[in-house]
Amino acid sequence: MAAIPPIDDTTKALDLTVRGFLFCLRRDGEDRLTLSAPHLEGYGAITVDWASADVQRRIAGGRKQLLTKAVGLHKKTDANVFDGTAGLGRDAFTLAALGARVTLAERNPVLLALLRDARRRALAHPALADAAGRMTIVEQDSTAGLDIAKGHDAIYLDPMYPDDGKRALPSKEMQVLRDLTGGDADADALLAAALQSGVARIAVKRPSKAPWLAAAKPSLSMEGTQARFDLYLR
């Protein structure tokens, strides 16, 4: 996307044109950075809120859920996890709340700003501060190489599934993110970069009926009701 002005804690309002669409960043009455897409009529603003009921439900699933097993957190309770597709950080925060140290990589500057704003607020929240303190956010295009992930116990990838026109309409939130980012059409390169990193455990989250990334057969797959985790193990 085109270069945009810096987005930091002092940014109150910013309008951006990305891929021909207008997006608006605003701070709401609770000093939360929000993202809206006026071209999507009736769609509400997005904010990253790790205190939400959805995130807390994920955390309540504990270390026996598929997400934590996929990155090995059920065996090593303080695992160092590199999240190469941070997005809105929900899975990353869940892992951090359950004891992991998580590095979140995000290449889109708007999503990066939303993540950093969420971490700022979480650090000031008594119930969220410990988990937020175990998170490090970096600006990184993971398809360009993952040398930065060396030394981590696992790499976690959750690329956006491309819109092929055959699937059901995505959630309103996902539609905003697709219009903002264009999706992850280069997702196969994510796996290639991860496999070259030397990290022993790579977990890829996929829709249950989606093909393997890069047509690469995993060491094993963990099936859920709506998604699966493909594991590539050294």
Image (cartoon, rainbow, N blue to C red):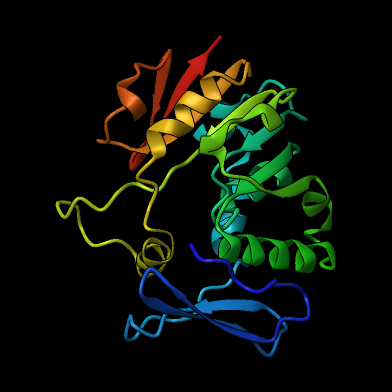
In the picture, measured across the screen, residue 210 lies left or right of residue 188, that is: left
Residue sitting at x 61%, y 15%: 200
Question: Height in image: 59 above or below 41?
Answer: above
**Quadrant where the image shows the C terminus:** top right
Give the x, y percent position of residue 163.
25, 53
Q: Quadrant of residue 197?
A: top right
Q: Is residue 73 visible?
A: no
Residue closer to the observer: 195 or 155: 195
* Residue 80 in picture, x, y percent from top left: 73, 30
Q: Is residue 50 above or below residue 225?
A: below
How many marks overall? 0
Horizontal arrangement in the rendering, residue 187 relative to residue 106 (left or right): left
Question: Where residue 85 appears, x then y in whole percent?
Answer: 54, 44
Q: Does residue 226 sit above or below 36 in this rendering?
A: above
Q: Residue placed at 33% from the left, 39% from the top?
A: 225
Q: Is residue 95 above or below residue 198?
A: below
Q: Going by the picture, which residue comes out furthest to the left?
A: 166
* Observer-nearest of 202 and 58: 202
Q: Residue 128's x, y, as percent?
A: 77, 59
Residue visible at 43% across and 12% down?
A: 219
Residue at 58% x, 49% y is 86
